[in-house]
Amino acid sequence: MAVDGPAAWTAGPSDTTKPNPDFLDCYISPFAESHEADPLERRIADAVYAAEDVIESHIVDQIHSGSTIVADHDFYHNLQKVIEEMDLINKEVKSIPVEAQTKQKPVAALAASSPTVKESVIVGSDEVFHDVLDKLTSHQLNRQIIPITGMGGIGKTTLAMNLFENALVKERFDIRAWTTISQTYNVRESLREVLYRASGRESSSDLSEDQLGQNLYQFLFGRRYLVIMDDMWSIEAWEKIKFLFPDNQNGSRIIVTTRLSDLSSQLNESCIVGMKFLDETSSWDLFCKTVFGKESCPIELENIGKNIVANCKGLPLSIATIGGLLAKSERTKECWERIEQNLNSIVINTNDGFCLKILRMSYIYLPNYLKPCFLYMGVFEEDDRIRVSMLVKLWVSEGFLKPRSGKCLETLAREYFMELVDRNLVLVDELGSTGNVKYCKIHDLLRDLCLKEAEKERFYHVIGDDPPASISERRVVLKTAGLLGSLSHTRSIICQYDETASEDDKVLLSRGLRLLRTFRACDFESYSSENVFGLVNSRYLAISVHDESEFSSSIDLLWNLQTLIVSCWKYVRVPNEIWKLHQLRHLEFPEGELILPNPASEDSEIVIMENLQTLKGVEDLLLNEEVVKRIPNVKKLHLIYPSDQMEGENCLSYLQCFSKLESLCCLTSNQSGDFWMRINFPNSIKKLVVANILEDILPKIGSLPFLEKLILRNGVFRTGKWETIEGQFQKLKFLLLWFCEGLVNWIVSDSSHFPLLQELSLDHLSELEEIPSEVGEIATLKSISLNYCSEAVVESAKKIEKEREDLYGEQLDLRVRYKKMPKTVMAMGRCDEDERRDEPEGDQEEWGLQNCANIIYESRSCTVLSEV
């Protein structure tokens, strides 16, 4: 069941409204494999939503009325009805026997002989096949566990079957046995299955689990055996039976296939075999062998066939399914085009939905707390690169997270995200420079699964060209817009407009949005800030506003606002009332600059914004004692100082008081050596971007104990050299030097000066003579990127590349881009369209660099900037 708001079960005056707190976590629906929704789950969800409607409607009414409503007969009447419904559900839940609540389905034993495997089904997995075969036949005598991991349908079981039937394997092992563990494993049945496969004799059904275990151990003792445990879902399954497989010191092996990467690590971290998606060539080869056997693909079908294969995204299950269908279909262009147009739907529904059933297993047995997070992935467009930081904020605003003591919700959300990655349900698309996951994707078939399950559970509703008159789902995904009907129940609107939609179509005029909590439309049209900030129940607002928009002083009525992301191409001034948003967690102005007023000292009530973690795109902020006191827990701070304010008074004098600050980006317009020397950075900083500093500040930066990423823009080296000091930059992984004037000699006396450096990027350093050879001796170094540097620097990098290969036997990733230096160096200010066209590729939103470009870029091939 994917329902948000788990805390709703605590509503009500008496304990009788609370069901068993473990029920929702343990309950396995008898409708899990059905196309119908579970009536009990639907009823629970409806009760939760009803409670939300009653309570939040009451709060919104109070806010709009401007006074506390002492007596509200309708509110108490409606609340009592919700409580009564919860009492009825609670009684029904208590009447269900405990064993029925968590009843596990029996595991069907495999047939006596392994399924035969066609040679073609392991196309593209030859390298993995031989890798595992080498592990099976190696001379290591101790018993080894070999985990094979990967997404459902990627070919783990097929690979294991081919290994099981391989002639060398048959010859080497005295005993071969196979069992399917599955999520709902039964230890006794699994032991009977292995013993039957190993001995060829059916065990008595009267034997207990202990007797079966003893018989199995005695039968395997002294023999060289291979046991394949297919589809394992938990370490507990292995822990219960591992002692029954003796280590005979004769080369016995156990293969475990699993969709869970973390389980593989627990089984044998040093021997994990990861199954990957097929590349273009292997995908086409598998497709042709499935469809045509030993024949060739007709030329007239080749292009459309390759389009079909490309849309399978390298998933063998998808390729084999569609290939099997086409093998039985007419070999005409018209027939294949019809299939191409409905590819995902056909793949999912072919062979009695076999493909969907394989993928649904991953969803059915997800812990309930992960189900809404996974289903939510379906709101994004096909092939979208989804920014993880944005996804985390949305999950928090949607109420998917069950608070845990000592962890902020964003940390918990990232843990949930990594669980989905470990289960191979979400794909890592790009890592940040310090190893964090920056972008992710979801395979098309899994996205279709999300859409199907979301429709079944009424989790969200996708609105296309024909919007309905009314919508009962809590979440709405807009593919097109216009005048919508009643959205009185809607809590979330995610805009995913078609690229072909006209500007007129992108005007959202909705009625009945008074309870809206999440509104994301920042990538599209502009809105009037007055309309948007009238949504007083909002938790998440990500929008583009008109340049002429002004923020109303009534912004403090947004009592529950957690995330505010505003795009505007002009300076935006916000009222002083923004300092009263005590729930605010993220305030971001990725485009344009936010003029944030200093909090009024005469306020009768000082609000401490203890939840605020991100403050991005703020201009000329005076970080005095009053401001720092208001936002003590900020973790990410991106500031811009285009004026001379910083020379008049120390605007960062209390920076060191931010004890939890991890990411600081501070861009200044002038060289301000004295200013930076007065600054004390908090030791908690991990990522730092600074501009227009003198080399005098570098020893202070180098002493930061946790600094992992440093970007120095427009630094000035008056002495002409930078000599690093021993014991500094001990945690640094990423270093970017960008337009550093006067840097001629970079002196590193020992490789221990940057012991953990992984990526070095030098950009527009025309005066630098060489990269210190000691940098090449850093064991962790993976890449050097040079953009428009001198020939001498390039030659030193090539020398380091060669010496490193000789020293460590590994290839250094060296990227070099040549081009003449740009003629213009911009003062800080807004870029026009021509200038913006030449900015470097990558996600500028994280940097706040659009409107404070000190540099005009002459090519889109400039270095890609990572998240700070």
Image (cartoon, rainbow, N blue to C red):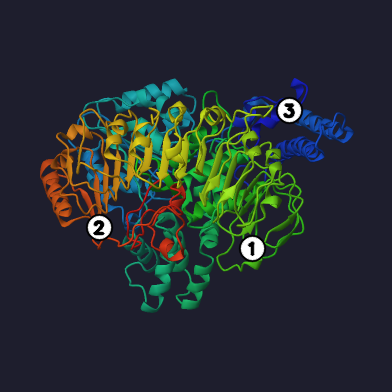
Question: CA gap, disc 1 to disc 3?
Answer: 39 Å
Q: Quadrant of the C terminus?
A: top left
Looking at the rendering, in which quadrant would you find the N terminus? top right
Which one is nearer the viewer's eye here, 366 or 651? 651
Disc 3 target residue: 11
To which residue does mark 1 refer?
506
From mark 3 to mark 2, how far is it between C-alphas?
63 Å
In the rendered view, tell whether residue 148 sits above or below residue 98: below
Position of residue 331 in the picture relative to residue 630 (left or right):
left
Q: Which disc is residue 329 wearing?
A: none
Report the amino acid beneath label 2: Tyr
Give the image location of residue 106, x and y in percent. 54, 35
Inter-mark Cα distance, 2 to 1: 42 Å
Counting from the top left corner in percent of width and height, residue 665 is at 42, 41
Q: Nearer the viewer, residue 692 or 38?
A: 692
Marks 3 and 2, the one that precedes in the sequence: 3
- Report the residue at 55% width, 46% height from top: 594
